[in-house]
Amino acid sequence: MYKLWSHPWFCQSRKMAEDVEGDCDISVRKQLIQSQMGKPMVKGQTWYLIDSKWFKNFKHRVGMDDASDAIGSVADPGPIDNSSLFNDDGSGTIKENLVDELDYVLVPSESWDLLVQWYGTVDKNTAIPRQVVEFGFFVKQCRVEVYFLELRLCKNFNLETEILHKFSKGDTIGNIKKTMRKLYEIPDEVETRIWRCHSSTEIDELAKEESTAQDTGLYHNQLLVIETRSEDGSWVRQTKKMPGTCRTATTVSDKSSTAGPSSIMTTRFNPYGYPSESRSAPGLCGLCNLGNTCFMNSVLQCMSNCPPITKYFLNEEHFSELNEENPLGMKGEIAKAFGELIKTMWSGRHSYTMPHNFKLQVGRFAPQFSGYQQHDAQELLTFLLDGLHEDLNRIKKKPYIELQDASGRPDKDVAKEAWDNYRKRNDSVIVDFFHGLLKSTVVCPDCSKVSITFDPFCYLSLPLPTKRERALEVLLFHYEATQKPTHYTVIVPKRSLIKDLVTNVGQLSGIQPDNLIVTEVTRNHFHKFFSSNDSLEKIDDKDKIYIYEMPVQNDTHVILPVYLWESSAKIGFSREQLFGDPLLIAAPRKNCTYDVLYQLVLHKLQRNICIPDDNSSWWNTKTKNYSNGDLTLNEDSPGDENDESCSDNGDCNGERVPRRIFSFYLVTSGADCSQDIVKIHNDGNPLSFPTLEHIGQSFVAAKWTREARDQFFFDKSLEDTEDDQSTRKNLQLGADDAWYCPTCKKHQQATKKFDLWELPRILIIHLKRFVFDRYRRDKVDRMVQYPVRGLNMSEYVINKSHPEAVYDLIGVCNHFGGLGGGHYTASCQNHNDHKWYLFDDNSVSEIKEQAVVSNAAYVLFYMRRNCYDEQMELN
């Protein structure tokens, strides 16, 4: 395929790469980077962020990607460019909510140094170094701290002294205190102490200076106060313990009256907007976002609106069933933190609250959730259900139970045995309401061995129809101008290149791929020309992709882009004045006169223009050798009033020269730079285009008057196309993971089937909208129809003795947006008033029942109608 143009930056970066090519063989580069990136992270190391697209191009270049061609066949990636990771305000800070592997890739410092040595960087501010810190409390996990913790600081409870400062999660309270003393210029001899503020009425002292910010549970935008001791030995705030609570109550000393109107101690002051006195209906309590924690808030709201679970915790039944010695549990901390939060949410005293204690406990036992980045709500739900189950497991000592094969026994007997054995080791309120039983049938393809097992489950994950391929809509413009453009729906792999698209279009159309040029057209002008090695990821489904059949550019002709431009009183040239589809013309490299170019454009436009008959006043009757409808004749034709044609009083021996339909100008590719317009004069000499060899540099605009466009041009681009219907393909699912057949004594690609045997009282259905593989992470936004009332699951249960299983929806965890910057909400039914509410972090609002069903639904919570007999009021 013809390489469209050579951008100056591209040429420079390619030359730089070629200069160092001899320093290190490409295969050696691959081995070096692969070995370094495979090393585990160690606390204190420095790693660097690299734009994922750049690193993807590097992997293609050296063959680190299975999708790559032969090593070295792909162009080098050029200098490292991280500009897409930085904010556009020039502050030098990186964008919020960047996603690992999707937006950036982490490489160790050794790899960064090598990549910079080989390819260089676009500027000195490209490097983004970050430290490796330990996350987690009981289970330590080393991770790169991409985002620092920004805290609000103030001195002596006076918010007029507030300062924003960023700290590492690994910084100790002692280090934070030193930083605050330095920021507020507190003398060494002055004694200080640090306070953490959760709300206007809830603060506590951070006395353990060896504890880290992560261990203490500090979160983004939290307020820390450094308090100084007065010369008389008194503090601004005196403390005492309130009976019956673990929180620190505060009373103001006699000197507090001097703190001023901005003091944190004033009665009405509220640094977090926390409504300490506001009241709300039980359960209608929002949860503040602690920094990208909407995923956690949505799960908590759905769990909070599961009536049996909420009743259990409101009645404090969990205290008598805490299993703090369970090695698989969280020492009872998750259950206690969840119970405390449920009591707050259903107290009716607050319209919203801060789940900081629950977030702290989650981070202690699940390091993957310890930061304040966005996470998957389903993963948190899985952790929460498992953590609550093990913290509340009534089995203090789990017995060893040997699994038995079905051996042809009736399913009813095998299922009962499996369930009884499971309950001997797992018995909790979570099992009571959320756990069911699946029948798993595996058949060996060789010996037909059938293996039947019954396994418990606490939610059903339903895969949504996905494609590893994508369908691209393209419009092919044939070289023969009389042939209508053809619309194709081309099926290509999601991870393929432009050359794969061109190959498919070539097979469908019978055109050699080398003769096809792929472009993106926006608002009647060329937005982009693609090269063969460009990734199809650069094309969105909404992009308008035009493919042009053209002869391969050589010494005899060049490819020239032409725009159609309607002139107006407005001075200059802009995209708003363009009309019709842009053209590509194969212009002679030599002897391309004004008339030759004019006839070439007329020829390309013959499906869209209509020439008046010979008797029209538009034509000059003295024009010779004109044949109506023949647009390829090299004859003068009418143009606009700005053309340099002679008039009756001109220097043309009294003969009137006809105007042309349009005249030519040289313009820029962006079609919006009026200062670069150059009129092409018709002096009979061959035209000279400064950079004609490279498409994307010089463009020609055919300028029409309004009169000429109205009379001659007819835009029929929508109906003047042909549809090709031969491009749809059926997609097949891949094989299941290999299963070890006890009869064949080897792993087999067996068939596996799941059947529902016993359904739980609360059924959780997880719609698998996020698709992950080694090449891509994607989200499926497909609409799934699900009933709000009367989901009858009885027909899907193979257990004939199963009771009636009719479910009503009680909660939906919603996900909006894509992987890089999505947002979670929850739609839940309040059990007291049976109304539906939208929980959007701290905001709670009533919604209509029909609004609950949407394509944002991610996790569905259903409750069986005969879940319990008693009528429950959650007050």
Image (cartoon, rainbow, N blue to C red):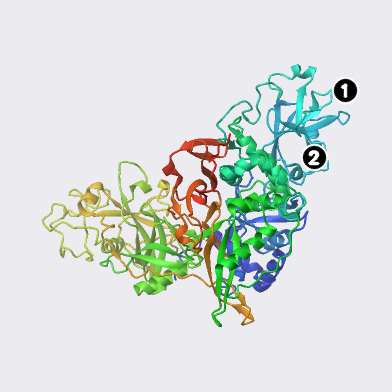
Task: Decide which of 320, 214 is in the foreground and name it.
Answer: 320
Left or right: residue 755 versus residue 271 is left
Residue 298, position in %: x, y?
Answer: 57, 45
Secondary structure type for disc 1: loop
Q: Amino acid under label 2?
A: Ile
Residue 716, position in %: x, y?
Answer: 25, 56
On residue 135, the disc is none
On residue 233, the disc is 1
Left or right: residue 659 versus residue 34 is left
Q: In the rendered image of this protein, does residue 434 appear above or below residue 192?
A: below
Task: Decide which of 606, 256 is in the foreground and name it.
Answer: 256
Q: In the rendered image of this protein, does residue 597 appear above or below residue 69?
A: above
Q: In the figure, residue 605 lies in which quadrant? A: bottom left
Q: Of the two numbered discs 2 and 1 on the same chain, state the one appearing first in sequence.
A: 2
Q: In the figure, residue 27 lies in which quadrant? A: bottom right
Residue receiving disc 2: 173
Instruction: Judge the density around disc 2: few (<14), some (14-19), many (≥20) Cα neighbours within 10 Å.
Output: many
Q: Residue at x 77, y 29 (%)?
A: 243
Q: Amino acid under label 1?
A: Gly
Q: CA distance from mark 2 to mark 1?
A: 23 Å
